Image: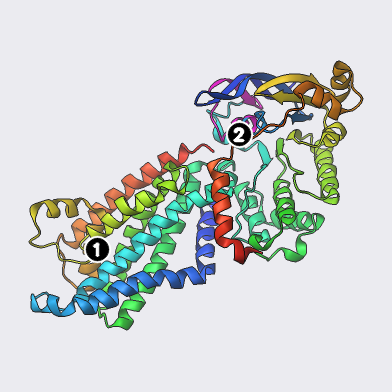
Amino acid sequence: MNAIYILWLREVKKYSRSRVQIIASLGQPLLYLLVLGFGLGPVFKKAGGGSYLQFMAPGIIGMAVLFTSVFSGIALLWDRQFGFLKETLVAPVPRINVMIGRTLGGATVAMMQGLLIVIVCLIAGFRPVSWVGIPVGIGFMAMIAIVFAALGTSIGSSLQDMQGFQLIMNFLVLPIFFLSGALFPLNNLPKALAFVTALDPLSYGVDGLRAALIGTAHFGALLDAVVLVIVGAGLLCLGAWRFSKIEI
Amino acid sequence: MNAMIRVENLVKKFGDFAAVDNISFEVPKGEIFAFLGPNGAGKTTTIKVLTTLLKATSGTVELDGMNPATHENEVRKRFGIVFQDPSLDQDLTAWENMDLHGVLYHVPGKVRRERAETLLKLFELWERKDALVKTFSGGMRRRLEIARGFLHTPKILFLDEPTLGLDPQSRNQLWTHVKRQNEADHVTVFLTTHYMDEADRVADRIAVIDHGRIVAIGTATQLKEKTNTQSLEEAFLALTGSTIREEAATSADQLRQMAKMFRGGARR
């Protein structure tokens, strides 16, 4: 238990100390929010979709949580390169506890990042339909964070060095984001696209956030939660297994 | 003889290359055992197999009667290690690195803080305990790694080239401390070093390894007698030849290089 806590604390400490990185990481979501939000807003309104900023804000929150959590998992590679990973791997602590501590730490950091984006969205003019939805939204952020932190840990445990990083970014993380319905409604999509978006775990995360924050949902909040819990449990198992196999 | 470390016909291959090629040795409880060899001889690979970081290709390995491949956690409870290459978290402070280690090794809170303070003072890092490790010089980082290695008292202590980059004062502190732990708590010590005088001074027995094979094993005196030489350094050269070995840079080294370039300005 103590080991899980201290490794969780390590992630949180490192995050809170990297102020420059925190500010830098706000750049991309801000760009999406402002440029797309106000740029596509009029077209979206004309098409009868209502306010695009309202629609997109949950998607951008989901994006921030996705990126931060996957990268915190992949940061395992840095620990491998700079040697700290060895220190935790030879410690008399079951590896699963090491993995859980790291993953929960990464998920917590991703949630903090998500909350920052919530604040940015509120400043940009986003208004949740009811304030009661906020805690439910935080619950969905937590689920998204755990799912993708576990995915990041699985990837980080399986790669030897940073060379595969671009590949992961372009063929996994960005598709997860773009196919999630973060930027467009999932209704009336071409069949192929509808099929792929239904396979993307983030679709359910973003849908859950929309259900909580703006009161509209494609799949429904309950299905969203069930899918996220199942996928999260599966990825945690995968991550634990990959992590237990690490050799240095 | 009560063997703390037992290695029999150990082979570790990376692809076709046998880094460790059929070695056998035993280290009895309470002995200080030195593993000497040129770069790339297989010293670190052997330590990695013993410390559960790598799985052996074939052969038997036992620490205190347990197999590191199958009883990982039992084995991990029995040893402490100072690695050859860095293993600190540079984004944490010296104190946090010590504390984290203590928690991972189940050292109770009060003892942990007391010992951390004593060790940081001993290795002259106390004034900088709240500074981030990335602001430390190479020597300070090395001293912190060693201080951290002594935070808990294991049954077996692995020291993989611990004195690399240390000044004579810290080296002296290190070996005094190792000797003391060995005498007071009967800690078995397995060390590798490139400094023959150190091996001569502290080790009860020495194994010389080259190209993944053990070429000689015995006390320093026995090795000198066997090779008809005056010093351990001469004995070592007689056993392993005088060609210089090249180690291929691993991807980790390459990445470290890259990271240095990126942070170059900020670091120093």
Q: Are marks 1 and 2 in contact (CB under 8 Å)?
A: no
Q: Image point 86% across, 31% down: which residue?
A: B200
**Residue B3 in view (yes/no):** no
Which quadrant of the rendered structure holds the N terminus of chain B? top right
Q: Image point 13% across, 77% down: which residue?
A: A43
A229 left or right, relative to A185: right
Q: Give the number of the disc on residue B48.
A: 2
- The region drawn magenta spans B46-65
Q: Residue furthest front?
A: B243
Residue type at mark 2 is Lys
Q: Secondary structure at mark 1?
A: helix
- Where residue B129 sits, quadrant-wise, is bottom right
x and y, in percent, of residue B138 in the image: 71, 54
Verify whether residue A4 appears in magenta: no
Q: Image point 71% across, 24% down: which residue?
A: B209
Verify whether residue B50 appears in magenta: yes
x and y, in percent, of residue B41 in the image: 67, 28
Report in which chain the residue with disc 1 lies.
A
Residue type at mark 1 is Val
Disc 1 crowd, CA 10 A, few/some/many (<14, 14-19, 20+): many
Marks 1 & 2 on one chain: no
Which residue lies under the disc numbered 1? A206
- Per the model, the C-alpha gap separating discs 1 and 2 is 44 Å
Relative to residue B7, is residue B146 depicted above or below? below
- Where residue A211 sits, quadrant-wise, is bottom left
